[in-house]
């Protein structure tokens, strides 16, 4: 069985590690990067099936990086994980809105802080 090779990118180390743990628990092989510059180097060094961008990456950097990914490998899916975005991100292939997901997940805790989520 092919494991999905995923590049996870976010500027907040603890949140990125949480994101990585979730992806690994779902069977992904994960490479992580704390900046677009680091992510660009990782992407140039190997092929990825999926790229997950945390909302902590600024919009201009998301746009530039997504265009670079699609110019090299047009079929690589780029997903933004966010709690802030009102609709679909105009640059990525898909957006996961954690506010909507959180409502469908039973929890005994408060909803996550809007500024702290990549998983």
Image (cartoon, grey):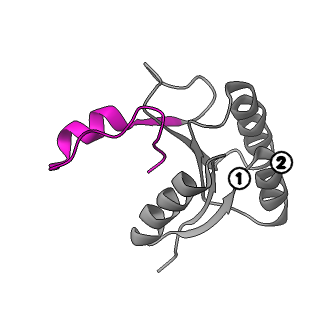
SS at badge 2:
helix
Which residue appears at 60% of the width and 34% of the height?
92
Outermost residue to the top: 86
Packing grade of label 1 (10 A; few <14, some 14-19, many >=20) is some
Give the mark count.
2
Q: Which of marks 2 and 1 is in front?
A: 1
- Mark 1 lies on residue: 34
| Above or below: residue 85 compared with residue 25 | above
| Above or below: residue 86 compared with residue 37 | above
Query: Residue 15 location in percent, x, y?
Result: 52, 52
- Residue 46 lies in what quarter of the image? bottom right
Stretch in magenta: 94-119
Query: Residue 85 location in percent, x, y?
Result: 47, 23
Q: Does the magenta stretch include residue 5?
A: no
- Mark 2 lies on residue: 37
Q: Residue 84 carries which label?
A: none
Which residue appears at 14% of the width and 50% of the height?
108
Q: Which of 38 and 70 is in front in this view?
A: 38
How far apart marks 2 and 1 lie (CA) works out to 8 Å
Q: Does the magenta stretch include residue 116?
A: yes
Q: Which of 33 and 89 is in front in this view?
A: 33
Which residue appears at 69% of the width and 33% of the height?
62
SS at badge 1:
loop
Question: Dots 2 and 1: beta carbons under 8 Å?
Answer: no
């Amino acid at each position: 069985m092919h494991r999905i090779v995923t590049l996870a990118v976010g500027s907040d180390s603890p949140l990125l590690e949480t994101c990585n743990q979730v992806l690994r628990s779902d069977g992904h092989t994960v490479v992580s990067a704390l900046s677009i510059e680091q992510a660009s180097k990782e992407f140039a060094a190997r092929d990825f099936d999926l790229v997950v961008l945390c909302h902590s990456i600024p919009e201009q950097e998301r746009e530039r990086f997504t265009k670079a990914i699609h110019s090299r490998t047009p079929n690589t899916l780029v997903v933004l994980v966010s709690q802030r975005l009102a609709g679909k991100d105009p640059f990525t292939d898909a957006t996961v809105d954690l506010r909507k997901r959180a409502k469908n997940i039973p929890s005994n805790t408060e909803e996550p802080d809007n500024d702290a989520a990549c998983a």
